[in-house]
Amino acid sequence: MKQFNLKTSRRQWMALTAAACAAFGVGAQAQSTWPSKPVNLIVPFPAGGGTDAFARPFSAQFSKQSGKSLVIDNRGGAGGNLGAGVAAKATPDGYTLFMGAVHHSIAPSMYPKLDYDLERDFVPLAIVASVPHVLVVNPKNIAVTDFKAFMELVRSKPGKFNYGSAGGGTSHHLAGELFKMQSKTFITHIPYRGSGPALQDLIAGNVDMMFDGLGSSAQHIKGGRIKALMVSGNKRNPAFPDVPCAAELGLPDYNVNTWYGLWAPKGTPADVQARAIEEVRKAAASDEIKTSWANNGAEFPNLTGAQFGNFVSAEIKKWAAVVKASGAKLD
């Protein structure tokens, strides 16, 4: 039997203790110093869209409270998948974050080949905001006063009217297909490279309607440039109490929400993830974000970390079923 050596054991114990303390010190330092420089936030849609409507106020609040800038990097294209692919390949050091959306839970069912996997290549941080979809029309192209008149007009001229979306496979597209399926109407889909360009064309009268996230449409509805006829779900939105909900209008199963989430590339240090989640919660509790979200008809669901990851998994399954049932395809 090997003889017990007190001096050797003591040296080993001291070395292990020193290593543990050093590791703790590095972790504590990383947590206390991040962010020590500006953080890049990849937004996978063009400026002016729904994601931007929440990314920019969040970015401003994050920068204010953390002392370091959260710089928005718009990478539009391929229904939000181009920017997602770029973010997935970013260095996982905490200085690149990704602001994705419900679109990215739909993409696996619509795109046969993606160069990223939302659940494999990212770590979920938090849902930043959630808003219902709203049916909005150009008031000159579709000169109706209410949803009933809208339905009579659309059904009388199947295929004549069209709706713009942020691109094939996005929630705008699937919201339109789900509406067509449940209302038994036919409306032509016009895909764009992001909801911003689609919304601008709606305002200009180049498309007739959109099934848009309320966040990006809110200010244009208030300004009278577009008209809201229906908000999805079974309750009216506090920001637009005069707009009836789908359940009131005979579409009880039409429930589409656009949510916006924050991810980091897989491999991002756990302490940085925790700090980022803390910053999201702190921002959501600020008066600035509360006011901005309320004005846009949005809420903060407070789903973070693993809870957010489980939610995303459920959304992927939900939208796969919708794609299958509607027969939706990329245009």
Image (cartoon, rainbow, N blue to C red):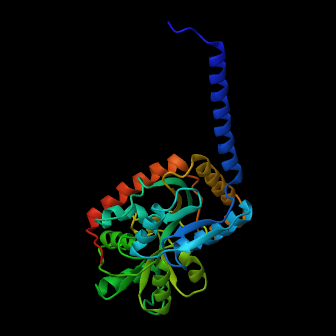
Question: Where does the image place residue 220, in percent across and percent down from the top left?
Answer: 57, 83
**50 up-or-down from 35: above or below:** below
In the image, residue 266 sits, relative to residue 327, either above or below, namely above
Count all numbered tags in the image, as a single digit. Answer: 0
Q: Quadrant of residue 150?
A: bottom left
Residue 279 appears in which quarter of the rendering? bottom right
Q: Residue 263: percent from the left, percent from the top?
A: 52, 58
Nearest the eye: 157 or 83 = 83
Query: 293 or 6, which is in the foreground?
Result: 6
Report the residue at 66% width, 59% height from top: 284
Q: Residue at x 57, y 87 (%)?
A: 224
- Which x, y percent locates residue 3? 56, 8
Q: Nearer the viewer, residue 59 or 253?
A: 59
- Work out which residue is located at the far top of the displayed protein and give it: 1
Residue drawn at x 66%, y 44% as measured from the top left: 26
Q: Describe residue 35's horizontal placement relative to residue 317 as left or right.
A: right
Q: Horizontally, is 147 left or right of 278 in the view? A: left
Is residue 143 toward the left or the right of residue 19 in the image?
Answer: left
Residue 84 in view: yes
At 48% from the left and 53% from the top, the residue drawn is: 266
| Residue 176 x/y as whole percent | 37, 74
Quadrant of the rendered image containing residue 135: bottom left
Query: Does residue 237 show up?
Result: no
Relative to 55, does residue 285 appear above or below in the rendering? Answer: above
- Which is more toward the observer, 100 or 275? 275
